[in-house]
Amino acid sequence: MATTTSTQTQTHSFGVSSNVEVPRGETRSSLTFYEPPVDGSKPWNYVEQAPEGSPQRNFGEDTHEVAINDIRGRENEFDMNINGFGTLSGIESKEKDFTEDDSIKENYYPEVEKLLLDNVEGAHRVFIFDHTVRRSNPDAKRGPVNRAHIDQTTKSAIQRVNYHLGDEAEELLKGRYRLINVWRPLNGPVVSKPLAYADSRSVPDDDIVPVEHRYPHRTGETAGVKYTEQGKWYYWSGMKNDERILLQCYDSKDHARTPHTAFDDPRTQEGWPGRESIEVRTLVFG
């Protein structure tokens, strides 16, 4: 996957906020991993408001400090089909505000579709099924998620194809199908709550746990991620608005999948802008 790179230094001042320097290089942070329900029951969480008297989720949290390596300057060392994530740079967008869903769908969705068709080898069809805008301000509808997870499992991948593509699903499921998230910041360079992702090969299947994902009208499935000493975590320092991370959540062929989470970088200083981002979730066929 083609990328562009910038000089790899420890700090880099940017634009209008000259008092802010983008932290570069390896950092360490406490990441939150999956801990099984204490009663041994099947794990679940509610996507929206939980029913009265019920917790939002029935599983716990297991926190560990890990090294998180910077991919800035070495982007071409990572391949989505091997590591589970890949990068693209120099991507301009017609959509600027990302405040109205209709505008995002009209302007940004076609850009995402073209990006994937042009850059994912073998892709011949893309279906975009949703997006999430995240902002760090307290009144935001969605904020960064500080919990290691994968958005889809084998079960939910098949469910997604059937749910969204109906009569075409049986034929589409005979070929290669993937679930790929296209992630970008909206107020880059990112200096707060950056996104971390693990090399798919470094997290064993035994440490990926299916979790019921309960919507008001149906139940899907996501995956919790247990802590493993084998885990190798990465981030892209100072990610800019024209850069994209492709996070592969499922692949019916190569099975690379990407645990990911927001994290608190200890180098972030008070007053620095909180991260704003959008992730677009897609089914990619071929």
Image (cartoon, rainbow, N blue to C red):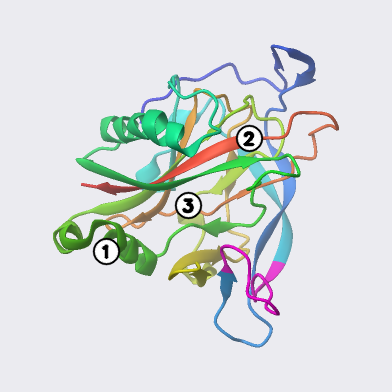
Residue 9 point in image, percent of width and height: 67, 20
Amino acid type, mark 3:
Thr
Q: What element carries label 3?
A: loop
Residue 286's disc is none
Quarter of image, res 138: top right
The N terminus lies in which quarter of the figure? top left
Residue 258's disc is 3
Residue 171 point in image, percent of width and height: 13, 60
Q: Alpha-carbon distance for marks 2 and 3?
A: 21 Å
Residue 14 point in image, percent of width and height: 69, 14
Q: Is mark 1 on a helix, strand or loop?
A: helix
Disc 2 designates what residue? 276
Amino acid type, mark 1:
Asn
Instruction: For residue 183, say whether it is visible.
Output: no
Q: Which stretch did the figure color magenta?
A: 46-61
Q: Does the magenta stretch include residue 52?
A: yes
Q: Is mark 2 on a helix, strand or loop?
A: strand
Mark 1 vs mark 3: which is more N-terminal?
A: 1
Quarter of image, res 154: bottom left
Q: Does the magenta stretch include residue 142?
A: no
Disc 1 designates what residue? 162
Mark 2 vs mark 3: which is more N-terminal?
A: 3
